[in-house]
Image (cartoon, grey):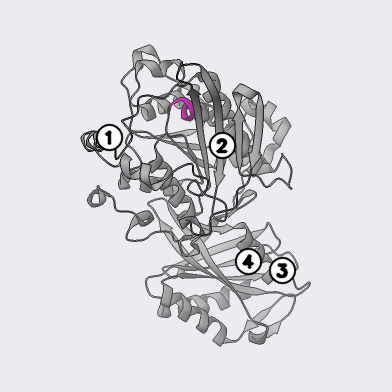
Amino acid sequence: MVYTLSFLENQYAQLTESVLSRSGLEGAAYLLCNRSVTDREYKYLVKEIVPVEDKHYITRTATSLKIDSSSYVNVTKKAKLSGLSVIFVHSHPEGFKEFSPQDNIQEEKLHSFFDVRLPGTLNGSLVLSSNNTYAGRVWVSRQWEKISRIRVIGKQFRFLDNSNDEDAIPEFFARQVLVFGPEIQKLLKRLHIGVIGAGGTGSAVIEQLTRLGVGEISVFDGDSLEKSNVSRVYGSKVSRKRRNKAYVAKLNIDKIGLPTISNSYTNYITQESIAKKLRDCDLVFGCTDNQLSRAILTQLSLRYFIPLIDVAVAINSDENGLIRDITGRVTTFFPSEACLFCRRRINSRTIQLETLSKAERRVLAEQRYAPALATDDPAVIMFTTAVSSQAISELFHRLTLFVGEDRVSTEVLLFFDQTRIRTNRETPKSDCVCQNTKYWGRGDSRDYLGMTWPDSNNS
């Protein structure tokens, strides 16, 4: 089991301010966390930061802390009331990067207290020696397990890993290392990225992620290839028609021969058992034309702090069949930004119609309560590939800020017919579900993502 900790950017800033701001003195705080638990990862999702109040410091020096018991008793009561885990955090201002022998003694007592007061809950500890350097651990069955990753999601996507990756970078990546440096290449190797939809845009995203050296890619698509897909789906062949798109994408990843681990899920994420696999991803690309799937990804990002980069291409014609406009869109979403509902990219009415059977939809169309069933949208490989490349560029900007630290836009629009690019950052709608902070970092719940699922008994 891997143990990790996920913050929003403003939460991490609040934590570092709480424990590192007093020069030469140790500081402390508590993290109250929700959880996500899968077969491979136990993820803590920070819900609230509770700094230790000045009145609760009995001793506070450059090398030691002593905190009044009422401090952690009050925090424990709050955690128990909301079913949260507690991570105790303190700083080492002199730069010592590990837990000290005194930490080991005191924190074993503290966590024995947590075990009694918070039964059935795993809690942990964190030491910050700087803004980027930490040691973390979880108290499991009266022994310590390492917290191996801290994710910080916001203007920049930061993945702070406790690993000693001294492996040489393969020569395949030598040219891109010249641009972004060896540390980013090592980070790519450690990332697990999900791609939802393996058609025109999705297959191009997958192709580029693989050749860039991403460590693990999970592809989700319940659709099969048709003859018309061969003209724009990477990895497709005439002889592979009617094979599942996710499976074809996996074959293509493996065929390239780079060390990327590939997973294919040959069903739609509208099935709960499949959607739950998304929890293991560090980031997801939405490359689907289905609004229900986009709504699921929006909820995933809100509840699990998993950034979403959503990709779309629209080619519109007039009544004479002449091209009116060709627009590509790349939208980056995470809690605190405007979601796809806020931006009117998806809406509840269309999502409701997508859940109906074809027969039910046809009846409503005949009664003029719904649009007629749509035919296939037009698509051309140079447009789908260009938008996919822009999406990959957005990922690299979030990892490196290469476009500039002052950039705040979260959407890029490519107007191909006008040879023009525009960026924007919309203000979230105050009444939108994405602004209800009780869902931020909610993690696992009985109703996964707050939805009713038709296959809930099979998850």
Q: CA distance from mark 2 to mark 4?
A: 37 Å
Image height check: is 354 above or below 83?
Answer: above
Question: Is disc 4 placed on a helix, strand or loop?
Answer: strand
To which residue does mark 4 refer? 127
Q: Quick one: label 2 or label 3, which is nearer the N terminus?
A: 3
Question: Is disc 1 placed on a helix, strand or loop?
Answer: helix
Between residues 357 and 119, which one lies in front from this camera angle?
357
Q: Is residue 131 magenta?
A: no
Q: Quick one: label 3 or label 1, which is nearer the N terminus?
A: 3
Q: CA distance from mark 1 to mark 4?
A: 60 Å
In which image quadrant can residue 69 be found? bottom right
To which residue does mark 2 refer? 330
User: Residue 362 placed where, x, y %?
Assistant: 24, 33
For the point 74% across and 48% down, the residue is: 406
In which image quadrant can residue 28 be found? bottom right
Between residues 305 and 409, which one lies in front from this camera angle?
409
Give the magenta range. 198-203
The residue type indicated by label 4 comes to Val
The residue type indicated by label 3 comes to Leu
Question: Is disc 2 placed on a helix, strand or loop?
Answer: strand
Relative horizontal placement of residue 397, taking residue 272 as reference (left or right)? right
The residue type indicated by label 2 comes to Val
Q: How many marks?
A: 4
Q: CA distance from mark 2 to mark 3?
A: 37 Å
Relative horizontal placement of residue 110, taking residue 154 as reference (left or right)? left
Question: Is disc 3 placed on a helix, strand or loop?
Answer: helix
To which residue does mark 3 refer? 20
Q: Nearer the observer, disc 3 or disc 1?
A: 1
